[in-house]
Image (spheres, grey):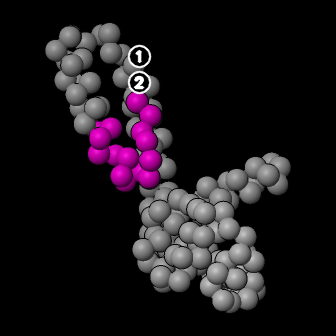
């Protein structure tokens, strides 16, 4: 995998972990992560804005990332959400294949159940559900 793809995967992973566990970080860690990862500020820009050194920003980002990884290692929320997403996607694919084999009433009932799941799952999974 290219370093650009590795970097994108890391950014995505950090974003996911922040979505799940960001509230467990200190206010300062959240502020720095949001400036760096969400607002795309450079380390120097963050340092200047917060009146700290560039090295302090780097250290805070590293420590916060390590904390997020530790939370995931113990709680596994991101892993569970990804597994749930895969299972949901498989269910929707299978439903599309067998839908025609059921009565119209059963199809409507299943469609309603899938629509209901689509409304509830995104909050747990951190985004849109494929259906």
| Quarter the C terminus occupies | top left
| Residues rendered magenta in the picture | 117-131
Quote the CA–CA distance across marks 2 and 1.
5 Å
Viewer can see residue 70: no
Q: Is residue 123 inside the magenta stretch?
A: yes
Answer few, some or many: residues within 10 Å of disc 1's Cα (few below 14, many 20 plus, some between 14 and 19). few
State whether residue 21 is above or below residue 117: below
Residue sticking out furthest to the left:
105
Q: Which residue is mark 1?
A: 97
The x and y percentages for residue 63 are 63, 82
The x and y percentages for residue 82 are 49, 50
**Relative to the observer, which residue lies in front, 30 or 62?**
30
Quarter of image, res 44: bottom right
Contact (CB < 8 A) between labels 2 and 1? yes
**Relative to the observer, which residue lies in front, 25 or 80?**
25
Q: Residue at x 25, y 12 (%)?
A: 102
Q: Is residue 122 inside the magenta stretch?
A: yes
The x and y percentages for residue 64 are 59, 78
Q: Residue at x 48, y 41 (%)?
A: 86
Answer few, some or many: residues within 10 Å of disc 2's Cα (few below 14, many 20 plus, some between 14 and 19). few
The residue tagged with tag 2: helix, strand or loop?
A: helix
Q: Which residue is mark 2?
A: 94
| 7 on left or right of 27 | right
Q: Main secondary structure of the magenta part?
A: helix
The x and y percentages for residue 62 are 67, 78
């Amino acid at each position: 995998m290219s370093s650009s793809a590795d970097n994108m995967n890391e950014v995505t992973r950090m974003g996911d972990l922040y979505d799940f566990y960001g509230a467990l970080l200190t206010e300062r860690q959240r502020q720095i992560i949001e400036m760096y990862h969400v607002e795309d500020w450079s380390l120097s820009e963050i340092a200047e804005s917060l009146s700290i050194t560039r090295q302090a920003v780097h250290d805070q980002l590293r420590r916060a990332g390590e904390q997020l990884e530790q939370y995931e290692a113990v709680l596994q929320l991101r892993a569970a959400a990804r597994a749930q997403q895969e299972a949901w996607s498989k269910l929707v694919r299978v439903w599309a294949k067998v839908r025609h084999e059921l009565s119209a009433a059963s199809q409507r009932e299943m469609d309603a159940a899938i629509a209901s799941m689509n409304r509830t799952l995104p909050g747990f999974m951190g985004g849109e559900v494929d259906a």
